[in-house]
Amino acid sequence: MQKVYRVEQLTKVYPKGPTAEGYPTGVTANDEIDLEVAQGEILGIFGPNGAGKTTLVRQMAGLLRPSSGRIFLFDHDVVAKPAVVPRYAGYYNQIAVGLESHKFREVVYGTGRLRGQSKAAAQKQTDSLIQRFDLKELADRLVGKLSGGERRLAALLSTFMNYPPVLILDEPTNELDPVRRRLVWDYLHELNGQRGTTIILVTHNVLEAEWAVQRVAIIDLGKLQAMGTPGELKRLVEDTVRLEVRLRSGQEEQAQDFLARIPGSIRLRLGVWQITTPKREASTLFSTVIERLGFETLDDFRLITPTYEDVYIKLTGKRWEGNDGRENTTS
């Protein structure tokens, strides 16, 4: 199968001292990353905020020059000739679209024209996307008058114009309501299935995106920690399950000593505990917790099968945090 992208020993170090666009300084955002993306696959790049995901795809999109390493897109050297990227790839980033004095439909239509679509073709696809995402009420409103999520929709729909063979999407469903998030995932699957579009999906929300991807790259602290199919990665932790326990209000003090002594227990927040245990011991653990605490102490509980978060914990020994304190530009 043809390789769309080849990334070889990619390293990006932000220099110390003031930098443009507010990038953090003195940080190794990517550290000798090697990966390949096959034509027609959906690759998920997962990791917590600050892991180096955005820095990686900005380099793949030709928007950021690496400190060292090589990137090839359909065998074109992206580092040497970054202008080749727009011929093949549509890139959506986390920054809301500008063009505040233009209407929503004008932003989408104009992108199609810039990408070489005829007036008729750009108009047809613009109308189709507006209808598909139920955006008729926004179509003729100025972008500057829209909410953050609505602006992101204008940018996201623009990314789809003229059907680029590769889509690089950085947190595409941030700030979207649940209905439109579902529409985005359905549309991406349609593009992949019907047009063979290669999709590189960056997110830290693995619970939402894990079902959509065919292969996964997990990044932490700038390093590629693991890469494989969902099944391959989950087999690393398939012998474990997690019991999540929620306590009733005011019951934390009397329950915490017991819960803290259980091997594999972690206090997630006030009144919420999580216990990781081998599958073979799950039934005994469940019975012990119920017997010791009683239903009058418990507000809710559930068993959770392995997720990519569990894979991350297995590989790094850390919990999957929403933000590790670094700037989002390296996420």
Image (cartoon, grey):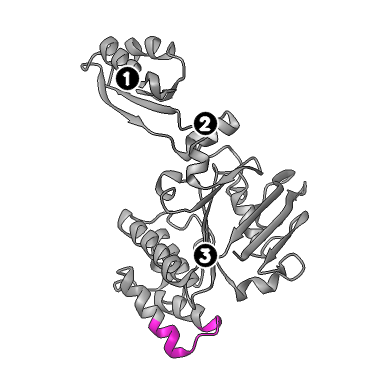
- The earlier-in-sequence mark between 3 and 2 is 3
The residue singled out by tag 1 in the image is 283
Which stretch is magenta? 113-124
Residue 106 inside the magenta-drawn segment:
no
- State the CA–CA distance, disc 3 to disc 2: 32 Å
Q: Which residue is mark 2?
A: 319
Looking at the picture, does residue 24 appear above or below residue 183?
A: above
- Evaluate whether residue 30 shows in this view: yes
* Magenta-span inclusion, residue 118: yes
> Image check: 279 left or right of 230?
left
Q: Residue at x 55, y 80 (%)?
A: 115
Seen in the picture, residue 206 relative to 162 is either above or below; the reply is: above
Which numbered mark, 3 or 2, is in the foreground of this view?
3
Viewer-closest of 254 and 301: 301
For residue 140, which numbered disc appears in the image? none
- Whole-number angstrom distance, CA of label 3 to CA of label 1: 42 Å
Location of residue 142 in the rendering, given as x and y in whole percent from the top left corner? 40, 73
Q: Position of residue 314 (x, y in %)?
A: 55, 31
